[in-house]
Amino acid sequence: MSLPVSSSLPRWTVRAFGALGALVSLVGCGGGETKVMSLAELSDRTLTYALTDVDDEENPDAQGAHRFTVSYSVVDGPCSRFADDVTATLNGEPMTVVPGGASEVGGRGDACENSRAYFNYDPGAWSREPVSDLTVQLQDATHTVRLVLQGAKAKRSFTFQGEGTPDKLRVGQTYDFLWEPATEVPGPVSVMIMREGGRAPGTLTATQEGGKVGITIPATTPQANHLLSMEASLAGIVRECVGVASCDGTLFHSQDFVIAVVP
C-alpha cells in the first residue's frame, strides 16, 4: 500500500531532521571574512554531534536521512575554515570533511558555514550489527580531537507490540510501540497522523513509560489510509571528549507507518 503525501506541505519529519541538520549559522561572523584555522586554534569551541535516523515512507533514500555529523560552534569574529590537512574518521572509516567558512546562504553575505565532518551510514548494516560505541577522531598537524559516544552505533526503531500488525489499526483502540534499542529511553515521543491525500497532519496524544509508547486512534478518525509518523530524540552518553572545550548533541529517530484505519 502506497500513500502519496501532498508536496505543498513540508513533512513534519523533514522539519525535525532539518532542525538537527542545520549546520549553517547566520550569526557571529565578521563581515563575511574567512580565517583558516588549525584544530589547535579551534580547541576552545564546542563540538556538536548529530545522529539522524529518518525512516521516511515517501523518500526512504533521502540525502542525509541516515547520517552522523560533528560540527564546530560559530563564535564572534571571522568564519573558521579547516586547514587542508584536516582528516576525520568514524570508527576508523573516513568521514567527508566540509571546511566551512563565509557563506551567502539565505542571501546574507555575513553568514558562517560551520566547519564539520559527516558520515552517511548504511541503516541495513547497522540493524544487523551489534550495538557499539561511536568513535570520532579529527586530526591535523597540530592537534587531535576525539569523541566517544557510548552505545550510539545502533539502528533505532519503533517496534509494534501486541497482537495484529501495524498496517491495520481500529478506531478507539490503544496500541503500543517500543523504542529500540530497549536500553535507551528517548525524550518525549511525538506522534502525528495524516490521511491519504491530506494536507494537514493531526497530533495524537501519546503516553510513555520508558521506551514504551501508547497511542489511541480517536473515534473521529476517518476510515481510510493514513500515514502514522513517530519521532523522538535523546542525548548521547559522552564517554570521551578530548581536544575541544566540550561535546554536546542529539540522537534523533523518526519512522513512518502506512496504516489503514478500520472500524
Image (spheres, grey):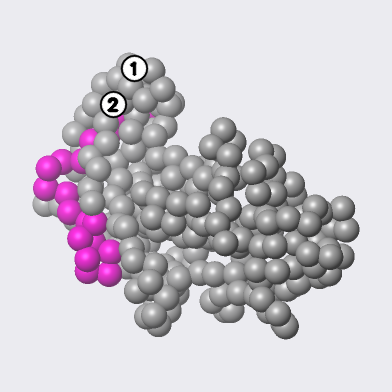
Q: Residue at x 75, y 62 (%)?
A: 261
Residue 75, given in percent of the width and then of the height, sits at 39, 33
Front-most of residues 1 and 85 = 1
* Viewer can see residue 63: yes
Position of the N terminus by quadrant: bottom right
Mark closest to the chain's N terminus, 1 or 2: 2
Q: Residue at x 36, y 49 (%)?
A: 63
Classify mark 2: residues with Cα within 10 Å, few (<14), some (14-19) or many (20+): many
Mark 1: amino acid: Gly
Query: Residues in magenta?
Result: 76-95
Find residue 89 and report its image quarter.
Answer: bottom left
Q: Residue at x 75, y 49 (%)?
A: 203
- Tell me the element at label 1: loop
Magenta highlight on residue 93 = yes
Q: Residue at x 30, y 20 (%)?
A: 32
Residue bearing mark 2: 102
Residue 186: numbered disc: none
Determine contact: label 1, label 2, CB under 8 Å.
yes
Mark 2: amino acid: Ala
Front-most of residues 146 and 211 = 211
Classify mark 1: residues with Cα within 10 Å, few (<14), some (14-19) or many (20+): some
- Tell me the element at label 2: strand
Residue 68, given in percent of the width and then of the height, sits at 37, 57
Residue 135, given in percent of the width and then of the height, sits at 32, 67
| Left or right for 237, reference 187 | left
Residue 186, given in percent of the width and then of the height, sits at 62, 65
Find residue 119 and report its image quarter.
Answer: bottom left
Residue bearing mark 1: 109
Instruction: Compute the Cα span from label 1 to label 2.
Output: 8 Å
Front-most of residues 193 and 233 = 193
